[in-house]
Image (spheres, helix red, strand yellow):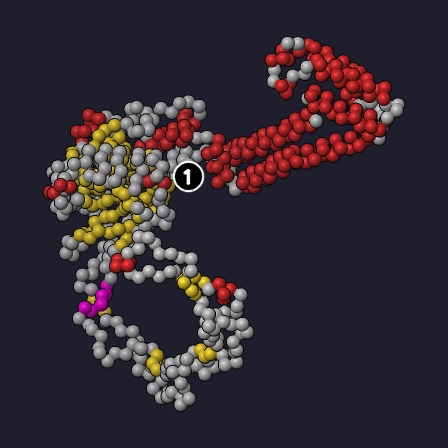
Amino acid sequence: MAWKMGGNRAATLALLLASSLLLLSAAKAADLGPDSESDDFEDGYVEDVQEEPTAIDGDEKLAYESPVIDAKKFHFADHFDDVEASRKKWVLSQAKKDDIAEEISKYDGIWNWESPQRIVWANDLGLVLKSKAKHAAIAAPLRQPFEFKSDKPLVVQYEVTLQEGQECGGSYLKLLSAGKDTEQLKAFNDKTPYTIMFGPDKCGNDVKMHFIFRHVNPINGTITEKHCNKPKNRLEEPFKDKLPHLYQLVVRPDNSFEIRVDHKIINEGSLLTDFKPPVNPPTEIDDPNDHKPESWDEREKIPDPTAHKPEDWDEDAPPQLPDTDAVMPNGWLEDEPDMIFDPTATKPEDWDAEIDGEWEAPLVDNPVCEKAPGCGKWKAPLIPNPNYKGKWRAPMIENPNYQGKWAPRKIVNPDFFEDLKPFQMTPISAVGLELWSMSSDILFDNLIITDDVEVARDFAANSFDIKRRYIDRESDSFVNKVVELAKANPSIWGIGLVAIVALVALTIYCRFGTAKSQDSAAKKAAAEAKKTDDPQPDDEPEAEEEEESDERAAGDSSKESTPLSASPKKNQKSDLDDNEKETKAAENQEPAQTEESNTKTRKRQARKE
């Protein structure tokens, strides 16, 4: 019996182990298959990203060194690791907002250069907005202004880590327009002219990835903000996972643009067609002086003026009538009310008639009516009125005077212009962060502005990519691997489901099937024992001698053990005597003694086990 149960447990463990090995082997095959590729990011294959050096793909420790900044390749670059040099670049705003109360108008948010809360490398620092629910602004001049007249793109790239998550607030940056208003960065505020605003923003369920550029009207010089259309997929994870995320904007001279998050394109299009309001106004507009004539008839259909109400049309007929064929059921108690005052109710002792009014007992169902078809005055049930027609209305016909929907006439747009090169924006001379957030400890890192996409990718490869690979490696686990494998290979779910079903089925069989078969076998053995005089296994001399020798060897130690394991010598002697008596009496009383012997044998088996 023990061997069978042990075999069942072994089979269960073997099946569980086989399922795990099957999943692991599938994972290994998926990772090493010819069609799979090593992935540095948790979102899958990244297009157009340079491969990392093979040195960090092995078992070597990932090490971080501040990216080397070649000033000739960047209009602005700051990794914030050199605190002294970085502090010299950035200027804290001392301005005030004009349109709010004095006590909250100051830009008194606190900025600091420090390591992230989740320290990866001690020498990797960032610019952190420490305060929340305060206006904060800080800006830095570009090494050289970015002019949009060349044939090179504008590339803006930076990291954001929302270390406390984000419920309401922004982490976008502004590329400030060159001019007198941006010469004094201490006066940087929300009214400071900017050319581009770019970055994430969230408040409640409103999630945005801002890309706004200010377009200058070539005719009258007025400036209008152009807002990029929202991306198709909602951006949620960067506001929740508290991990570093890389944001990149590329605007090209052909008016195309790309927005990437962690190297993945989330939005792309054209400056000419994917912004609201559009860059170029319509050639014609509605004439503001044109008005709809009073006689203009926009009705497509009208009531038929020649139709008349039929003489037999009764508008006052009710929709339902009492059924004249209905009769009152037998036993209906018309003299008994449906409800009566509760005869058991008593007026409360604190009832004040002057305040509470005259007391009346509450109404309850009349008990007399419980067995009757009904009580009270009987009324015939209502049935639909066959003569009911409702209010008469003339049928509708086509309007012979219909003139269509009126619209004002079109005139030439006096403000029309056609700008086919909106890429040529106002030059940029500084970069600034002007924020308000309900979350603290927003970390900015590795902010660069360049005109070369490859330079930006190389910079990310030596900073953000290494950082995320280290974080992903540290947080990786067997469960995460299985989940990611299942996402990439949906068939794994089927394999796992089959393994689980098989495991459950085997467990049920081991628990109930074997127990049932064991009980059946025991009953069958007992029945056979009653039909024969052969000695049972425990009645054999060798078994009894072994049992006796084991109990003697136990000695005094058996006295200190639990009652379940104790075997007193007195009981041993009594069992032997009983066995001798059974042998002598077997010739005279076979059936009764055989049954008694079986009973005693089962007792010894239980004690032995």
Q: Position of residue 362 (x, y in %)?
A: 38, 60
- Is residue 555 shown left or right of residue 323? right
Residue named by callout 1: 43
Q: Residue at x 70, y 20 (%)?
A: 608
Q: Quadrant of residue 431?
A: top left
Along the viewing direction, whichever of 68 and 571 lies nearer the viewer: 571
Q: Residue at x 22, y 39 (%)?
A: 133
Q: Is residue 269 left or right of residue 135?
A: right
From this viewpoint, is residue 76 visible? Answer: no
Residue 290: quadrant of the picture: bottom left
Quarter the C terminus occupies? top right
Q: Quick one: 585 or 39, which is closer to the camera? A: 585
Q: Is residue 250 magenta?
A: no
Query: Residue 27: horizontal and vertical position, in percent?
Result: 52, 34
Tell me which residue sits at (41%, 25%) in the image.
55
> Residue 422: x and y, percent?
24, 51
Can you give x and y, in whole percent of width and height, for residue 253 in the image?
27, 46
Element carrying mark 1 = loop
Instruction: Give, as a three-letter code, the residue at label 1.
Output: Asp
- Report if residue 287 lies within the magenta region: yes
Quarter of the image containing the N terminus? top right
Q: Which residues are magenta?
A: 283-288
